[in-house]
């Protein structure tokens, strides 16, 4: 009897998504009709913790494409001899299914997608709603051309445009739904004006305080939008929203005992709360055998780094780790709320995070 592991197939992937409750009957039909493999290019990479590894061989290519994993489809914005940083990908099918479910599309509605990428999501939307009701914009001309070719080969011709997705689509009347398949640092107010009152926006936010979070916003009649966070989401950032992970650090290091295990900070709920209380503070982390190591910086040169079981080192002005510890204590007193208790409101004056009550936004610790 052979002990070889059976290669994953796309029908099995769709079945698994349905078994997890991510696809209703209609979306299951759509996913079954649109194989992911039609939209993934020949040259792909798998993201490892510190680099992108090329996928070699047809069997390995098909196995990754038919798995519930992200597939890196471009590195270094397409430039040769770069450092090998992922700059575009085909998202995890389970995340695509989640976002399309949150979008809540209905027959006859029009959808705008920010970030065409491979064209796979545009194809799913076209299969569900019809080509003429789908509009998708991609900033990278090479990616846009490749997606257009893949869509045409598969028999789909949605409205496609090359341009900055942060800007409104010229001449496009307000749509019913807007989905961003790239991460946003903030929700551009101009995009809300692209959605009719009563419409829905689903987008991943790349929060500075380590996390990526998915948000579902309802557009109001006064051209504002509000909604709740719906779990974590890791996406490539919109190119105009790219930012370095950490700020430049200045000053001599000062050590002391850490009063808080940094591994306790790594929940999405705390990340949302701390991001609102400590705007401008960036935090990244890395798993260790004992827990986690974190680095935090602020644009004024303040910084702190520590790891589970180790002392904390602080740099620059102020005492950044003490500020983080104080915010953690606040979060504990609030009952350590989960991410789904937080929401976001976007107006022409910016965006604000709130906890349980959209009328009471979380303010920063510093004026």
Image (cartoon, rainbow, N blue to C red):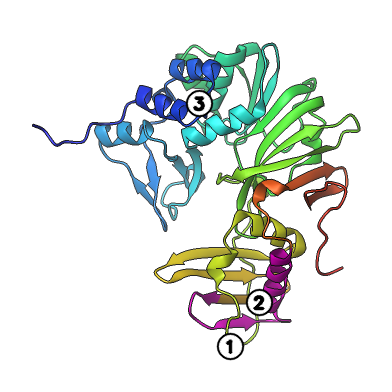
Q: Residue at x 25, y 36 (%)?
A: 57
Q: Position of residue 166 (x, y in %)?
A: 72, 38
| Crowding near the residue tagged with mark 3, few <14, some 14–19, many ≥20 C-alpha atoms within 10 Å | many
Compared to residue 5, the image places residue 126 above or below, namely above
154 in magenta: no
Q: Residue at x 61, y 11 (%)?
A: 130
Q: Which residue is mark 1?
A: 255
Q: What kind of element bears circle 3?
A: helix
Q: Which residue is mark 2?
A: 321
Q: What kind of element bears circle 2?
A: helix
In the depicted view, which residue is nearer to us: 113 or 362?
A: 362
- Write down the quadrant of residue 175 in the picture: top right
Which marked residue is nearer to the observer: mark 1 or mark 3? Answer: 1
Mark sitting on residue 112: none
| Crowding near the residue tagged with mark 1, few <14, some 14–19, many ≥20 C-alpha atoms within 10 Å | few
Mark sitting on residue 120: 3
Mark sitting earlier along the chain (1/3): 3
Compared to residue 10, the image places residue 274 above or below, namely below
Mark sitting earlier along the chain (2/1): 1
Disc 1 to disc 3, how far (Cα)?
50 Å
Q: Quadrant of the C terminus?
A: bottom right
Span of residues in magenta: 306-333
Instruction: Looking at this view, name the residue that lies furthest to the right.
Output: 222
Q: What kind of element bears circle 1?
A: strand
Decide: marks 2, 3 in contact (CB < 8 A)?
A: no
Q: Residue at x 49, y 15 (%)?
A: 29
Left or right: residue 177 compared with residue 40:
right
In the depicted view, which residue is nearer to us: 140 or 14?
A: 14
- Write down the quadrant of residue 217 in the picture: top right
Compared to residue 218, the image places residue 238 above or below, namely below
């Amino acid at each position: 009897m052979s002990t070889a592991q059976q290669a994953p197939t796309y029908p099995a992937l769709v079945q698994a998504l349905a078994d997890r409750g991510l696809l209703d009957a209609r979306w299951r039909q759509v996913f079954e009709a649109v194989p992911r493999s039609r939209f993934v290019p020949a040259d792909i990479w798998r993201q490892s913790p510190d680099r992108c590894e090329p996928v070699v061989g047809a069997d390995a290519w098909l196995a990754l494409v038919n798995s519930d994993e992200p597939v890196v489809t471009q590195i270094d914005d397409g430039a040769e001899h770069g450092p090998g940083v992922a700059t575009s990908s085909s998202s995890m099918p389970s995340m695509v299914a989640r976002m399309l479910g949150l979008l809540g599309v209905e027959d006859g509605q029009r959808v705008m997608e920010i970030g065409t990428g491979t064209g796979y999501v545009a194809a799913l939307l076209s299969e569900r709603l019809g080509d003429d009701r789908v509009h998708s914009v991609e900033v990278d001309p090479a990616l846009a051309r490749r997606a257009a070719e893949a869509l045409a080969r598969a028999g789909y011709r949605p409205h496609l445009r090359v341009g900055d997705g942060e800007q409104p689509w010229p001449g496009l009347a307000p749509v019913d739904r807007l989905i961003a398949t790239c991460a946003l640092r903030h929700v551009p107010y101009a995009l809300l004006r692209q959605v009719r009152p009563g419409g829905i926006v689903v987008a991943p936010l790349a929060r500075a305080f380590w996390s990526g979070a998915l948000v579902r916003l309802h557009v109001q009649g006064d051209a504002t939008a509000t909604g709740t966070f719906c779990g974590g989401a890791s996406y490539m950032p919109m190119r105009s929203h790219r930012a370095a992970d950490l700020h430049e650090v200045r000053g001599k290091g000062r050590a002391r005992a850490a009063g808080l295990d940094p591994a306790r900070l790594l929940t999405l709920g705390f990340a949302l709360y701390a991001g609102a209380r400590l705007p401008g503070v960036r935090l990244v982390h890395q798993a260790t055998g004992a827990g986690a190591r974190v680095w935090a910086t602020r644009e004024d040169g303040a910084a702190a780094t520590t790891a589970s079981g180790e002392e904390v080192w602080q740099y620059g002005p102020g005492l950044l780790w003490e500020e983080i510890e104080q915010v953690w204590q606040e979060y504990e007193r609030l009952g350590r709320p989960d991410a789904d208790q937080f929401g976001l409101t976007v107006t022409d004056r910016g965006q604000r995070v709130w906890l349980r009550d959209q009328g009471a936004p979380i303010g920063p610790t510093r004026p």
